[in-house]
Image: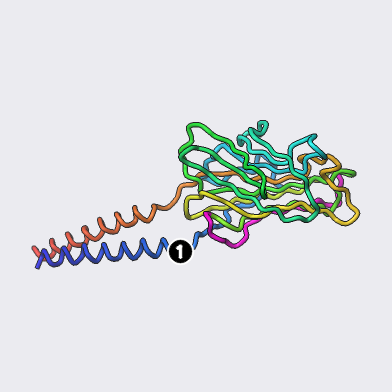
Amino acid sequence: MKKFLMSSYVALGTTFAGLTFASQSALAINITQSISYNQEITQEQRIAPDGWTDLGWKVEGRAGAAGGADWEFGVRPSNDSQPVEQLEWDWINGQEVRWNLTWDKSNQKVSFQLDNKNPIDYTLSNIDSLFNGFYLWTRATTVQGKVDPGTNVYIEVNNVNGENVNPLFSTTTATNQEGFTSLRETYFLSDREIDTLSGILKMSWEDGAVNPQKANARSRLGLKVKGFSVASIPEPGSIFGLLVIGALGIGSVVNRNQDS
């Protein structure tokens, strides 16, 4: 009887764990917003949520300058040093541009591709952390003759690990106040490790307004994506093991009760 109870509980735990693993595998990836900052919060106050560790890289885009006078996109360390790799881009008013970011954990490399351009990469050292958090950042500073009121920058994530998600975005529009900086910095958390992020980005300006790129607006109009590692829930395989151990524990309790 004792052997029967033990085997029954182990079988029950194994079956339940298997069902849990299958259901987790079938679930859609879940992305939640953690925190969001705006221009009212200073740079010193805009800190990552508790438990978020900077992975050491970011991708930055900006209005840049006409021709080859300045870069428009770069992959760089998160400490704001000069981009490791950069690319030139000609902005078209309101054009939605596809982008893709890949995190290669084993080789500690982040790659960013814009439309059909060749990807730009940054390889780190001594980083062995999962990528499951990120922020989207946009900024617009109103400057006469460079960034007119109503000029907008927008970045969106709509696909994670090849799976479509509800759009996650940051967007900022230049105000009517000369010299005023509008800013949005929003943090997002995934319930799974991230390998790829994909989406669209664009810059737009009102009819008759100055083209910020031709006006050499540079970083007065910009966007960023930055990666983080956040403490996460156990992987499905770990949950399986915990359930089996739990089932064995239940079986042991029942056996002890039978002996008493």
In the rendered image, the quadrant that contains the C terminus is: bottom left
Tell me: 6 left or right of 32: left
User: Looking at this view, is 207 or 41 the one in front?
Assistant: 207
* Crowd class of label 1 (few under 14; some 14 to 19; many from 20; radius 10 Å): few
Mark 1 — residue? Answer: 27
Among the 4 quarters of the image, the one containing residue 27 = bottom left
- Measuring from the top left, give residue 24's x and y in whole percent: 41, 62
Which of the colour schemes (rainbow, by chain, secondary structure, one colour) is used? rainbow
Tell me: 139 left or right of 168: right
- Measuring from the top left, give residue 6's x and y in whole percent: 16, 63
**Prevailing secondary structure of the magenta residues:** strand
State which region is magenta: 161-178
- Reply yes or no: does residue 203 show up in magenta: no
Q: Relative to 192, does residue 104 appear above or below in the rendering?
A: above
- Measuring from the top left, give residue 144's x and y in whole percent: 89, 44
- Measuring from the top left, give residue 17's x and y in whole percent: 31, 62
Q: Amino acid at mark 1?
A: Leu
